[in-house]
Image (cartoon, rainbow, N blue to C red):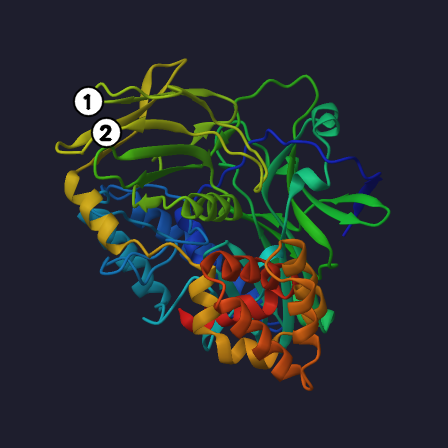
Amino acid sequence: HHSERIVPPSSSSELDHGSSRNVDASEVIRQQTVLTDDSIQKLRDRTTEISSQAEAYVTDDTVYRELPPAKISYFFIDGDETLWFPLFWAGRGGDICSEENQIVSSYAAKLGFEVEQGYTNHQFLGPEGNVDVELIDKSTNTYSLRFPTAGWYLWSATGLGFVVRDAVTVTIVFGSWSQHLGLDLQHHEQWLVAGPLFAITAEPEEAVAEIHLPHFISLQGEVDVSWFLVAHFKDEGMALEQPSRVEPFYAVLENPSFSLMGILLRIARGTRLSIPITSNTLLYFHPHPEDVKFHLYLVPSDALLTKMIDDEEDRFRGVRLQTSPPVEPLTFGARYIVSNSAHLEIIPTELKLSYRSPGEIQPFSKFYAGQMKEPIQLEITDKRHEILVWKTVVKPVDIQLGAATAPPAFSGAVFVRENHRQLQARIGDLKGVLDDLQDNEVLTENEKELVEQAKTRQSKNDTLLTMVEKKGDRALELLFRSLSERDPYLVSYLRQLSL
C-alpha cells in the first residue's frame, strides 16, 4: 500500500470527533463467504450479481431500516427471533416490524448463513464454526485467538474482520486515539476519527490476506470514500495510507502491515459539510426504593466506547435498559434536546453528539423518577431542525425486571475467599503484594515477616490469604486491588472461570 506521509507523534489531547457506521443491505452479501487466494476474484464477481438481487429485494414494497452493527456487550437478546443474525439488531417491544424480520430471514436463507446457538460476544464467526477469543489482559483490553483454517472471520461484536490464507494466531489490543493523535493536529489537518483503534499482530503475518477495519461514517450524501485513510501509529510517527477499498461499514487492507491502526476521515480544506454518523443511545437506571435515577448517553457507535461506558456504569450499580438506537444517521457536532413526558427535571437537557476517547468522561443527561409508578416516554430532538430523532418508553415493569436480573455488585472480598485454593497455588509477585498491603496498613512489619518465613511459595501464599481473611472485607478488598494491578491475567482468568 502507498503510505502518504509520516506525521510526527503528538502529545495526548482530548478528542472531540464523530464516528459512525451505516449498514447497507448489499454489505450483508459479503459476510459469511469463505475467501481464499484461489477464490477471492470469483467471490467478488458473484458478490456483484447477488448484491443487485438483494437491493431489488429490499426495495420491493418492503419496510427496511438501516441499523448499526453489534456492540461489545449486550448485543444479543435472549429469546429474540433475530438473535442468530448479527448484522441486524432488534430491541424488545416491537421496535422492528415483521416485514423487517422477514427480510433478515430471507437474507440469511439466501446466503446459507446461520450463527450457532452457542455464539457469544467473545467469539469470531468462521467458516467452520465459532472461534473463541481469549481475554489476555483486561486492564489493556488485550485479546488473543487462533484461526484454525483459511477463510473469512468476523468479530461481530466489534465489526473487525479477517480473511486468512492459512491457520494463524492473532493478538488484538484496543487503543485510544487521544493517546496518539493530538486534537490541535486533527483540527489543523481536518481529520475526523472514524472508528476504533486496534493494535493487531499476527503469526505468521503472511497468513493474513485482508483486515477489515470497522468505520462509523454513514456513506450517504456528500461523503466521499476517497476521504478515508488508514492511520498506522509506529515509533517514528503516524503513517497514512489509502485503504484497498471502502465498504458501507468497514475499510479493507489487503496484504496488510501490522501496527496500531484505525480509520480517519480527511475533509478537504474549506469544506463545511454535515458529516452523517451512526449513533447509540445508552439508557441506564440506578435502582433505589424511593427515587430511581436515570442516565442517558448519546454517543457515536464505537464498540469500545460502549463497553467503557457499560463498565463505568456497572461500577455504580447502573443497569442498562435495552433500547433501539436512532433509526437515521445523526450529524456530528450537532446539539440534541432530551425531554420526557412526565415533566421531570433533566440535567442537562442538551447533549452535543461528539467523540471522546474511551476512558475519558462521557457526557450524559440525568433525571430522577421517584418510585417509578407510571410509564415515562423519553425523546431526543434535533435542536436546530426541531425534528424528533429518537424516542422510547420506560415502564415500571422494565425497572422491576432489570433490577431482578441485574448481576450483584462485584466483591473483591468474595472473590478472594472463593478462590483461596487457586490463589494459594498461583500468586506470583508475593513481595509486591506484601509491600502494597503494608503500605495500606493491612499488614504490620511482623506479619509481613511471618509470611516470608514460610518455607514454600504455596505455604507463603496460604499464610497471607488466611491472615488477611481474618482481618475482614476491607483488608480483602485491598488484597484484591493489589492482585488486580500486579497480576491482571490471573485475576481475569479466575473471574472468567466463575462466569
Tell me the tag on residue 423.
none
Question: Which residue is at the far right?
Answer: 236
Which of the two residues, 449 or 308, is positioned nearer the viewer here? 449
Indicate whether 421 appears above or below 140. Answer: below
Indicate whether 93 appears above or below 415. Answer: above
Q: In the image, 336: left or right of 102?
A: right
Residue 93 seen by the camera: no
Measured as percent of width and height from the top left, residue 272 is found at 60, 17
- Residue beneath disc 2: 369
Quarter residue 146 falls in: bottom right
Residue type beneath disc 2: Ala
Crowd around label 2: few <14 · some 14–19 · many ≥20 (10 Å): some
Q: Nearer the viewer, mark 2 or mark 1?
A: 2
Question: Which residue is at the far front?
Answer: 446
At x 46%, y 34%, the residue is: 299
Q: In the image, 214: left or right of 92?
A: right
At x 50%, y 54%, the residue is: 158
Q: In the image, 125: left or right of 118?
A: right
Measured as percent of width and height from the top left, residue 30 is found at 47, 59
Which quadrant, please, contains the C terminus?
bottom left
Measured as percent of width and height from the top left, residue 284 is found at 34, 40
Mark 2 or mark 1: which comes first in sequence?
Answer: 1
Indicate whether 62 appears above or below 34. Answer: above
| Mark 2 vs 1: CB contact within 8 A | yes
Disc 1 secondary structure class: loop
Disc 2 secondary structure class: loop
Q: In the image, 112: left or right of 80?
A: right
- Residue beneath disc 1: 342
Which of the two residues, 462 or 92, is positioned nearer the viewer here? 462
Question: Which residue is at the far left?
Answer: 374
